[in-house]
Image (cartoon, rainbow, N blue to C red):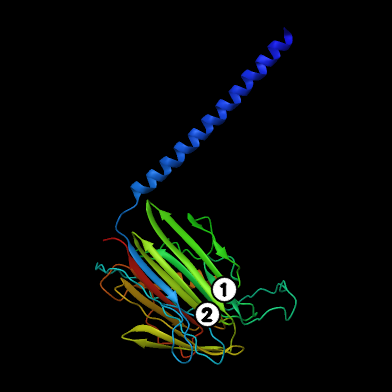
Amino acid sequence: MEKSKVIQFVFIALIGVICIIILSLVVAILVKVYQKDDTSENSTTTTTTTTLSLTSMSSSGSSMGNFTSGILPTTSNPIITSAVTSSITISPTTTMEIPASPKCPNPQKSNLPLASLPGAYDTLSWGTFRAPLYFGLRMRHSDSPLFGLMWFRQTTTAHNLVLKHYCEDDGVRCMWSDADGETFGSQPIVDVKDNKTTLFSTDWIRVNRSWEAQISVETNETVAFIFYFAYQDTVSNLSASYSVNTLSSINGNFVPLGNFQLSFSSTGKIVNDASLIINIEPMLDAGIVNELILSSFLPCKDASSNICIDNGGRPPDQTPNFAAIQFTVNGNF
């Protein structure tokens, strides 16, 4: 009799556990469906698709792809190109203070030893070795130039402006879906705030010492993307060329690599484009890039209420070592 009661009790307990598991699964499914429906309701059917990419070209001028950028061996001239598509809005301008000339009196570079044997790799090959950034490229060389991407939601003032540059707990979802860190990578990035979504991907590939990257953007708000290139030594140089007041190319020389060219172009309509070509004495400290950009914002040189990077009316520096270009796209139709 006692044995029968024990069996009955165990049977009832098993039924209870099964019921709890089934109930948990039902709740999880309902929550997932609710989140999916909620996301669909908050999104708009009209978006702006923007392509910003990086293609390298050989010295003969044949393109490896649309909208690309890259650094090629010393026997070739690498070219960076970018393409942006968006619409234009016009609003009144605001006034801001002119920033002071940037200086970095005590630039610091990492003195940590390289985690590899000498001669085990090409120190002049590029990769996503700038781990703290959402997207950044550099060589393994200790004095390597730095390439990076940052973005922000457009506003009328730089006060309390949030630059998305370093991987922080700021509501951005990202992860390299396919990558080896050295020769290729594909990374979707989702930035959601106040029921507005900016979705883009950073895709890049390297062949020997040249690389290409493509940034594809879809957004329903006004967002600015800034691409920058900077030296970490005191002997390399660059010079800028403009076409109708728009930065079109940069010619540079990094002694271990040789001469190279970075070219910028856009297709379609954009809200704003701006550039910043300056000298930072004696050289850039990678840890102050955010502060440098934030101190360089002024009202855009058009009738919009947006802000753009600007040298503050200072005469062009004769020996610049930092270059940045900004594209603002508008997803609000």
Going by the numbered disc 2, the residue's amino acid type is Ala
Q: Say which residue label 1 marks.
A: 286
Q: Say which residue label 2 marks.
A: 230
Q: Residue furthest right?
A: 117
| Disc 2 element | strand
Q: Are marks 2 and 1 in contact (CB under 8 Å)?
A: yes
Going by the numbered disc 1, the residue's amino acid type is Ala
What residue is rendered at 37% in x and 80% in y? 265
Q: Which residue lies furthest to the top in this view?
A: 1
In the image, is 94 to the left or to the right of 166?
A: left
Residue 297 visible at all: yes
- Which one is in front, 27 or 229? 27
- Which one is in front, 307 or 214? 214
Q: How far apart are marks 2 and 1 (CA)?
A: 9 Å
Mark 2 or 1 closer to N-term? Answer: 2
In the image, is 146 to the left or to the right of 242?
A: right
What residue is rendered at 63% in x and 21% in y? 13
Q: Where is residue 284 in the image (x, y as percent from the top left)?
A: 55, 78
Q: Where is residue 15 in the image (x, y as percent from the top left)?
A: 59, 22
What residue is rendered at 53% in x and 30% in y? 22
Is 240 drawn above or below residue 177 in the view shown? Answer: below
Q: Where is residue 191 in the image (x, y as percent from the top left)?
A: 44, 57
Residue 291 visible at all: no
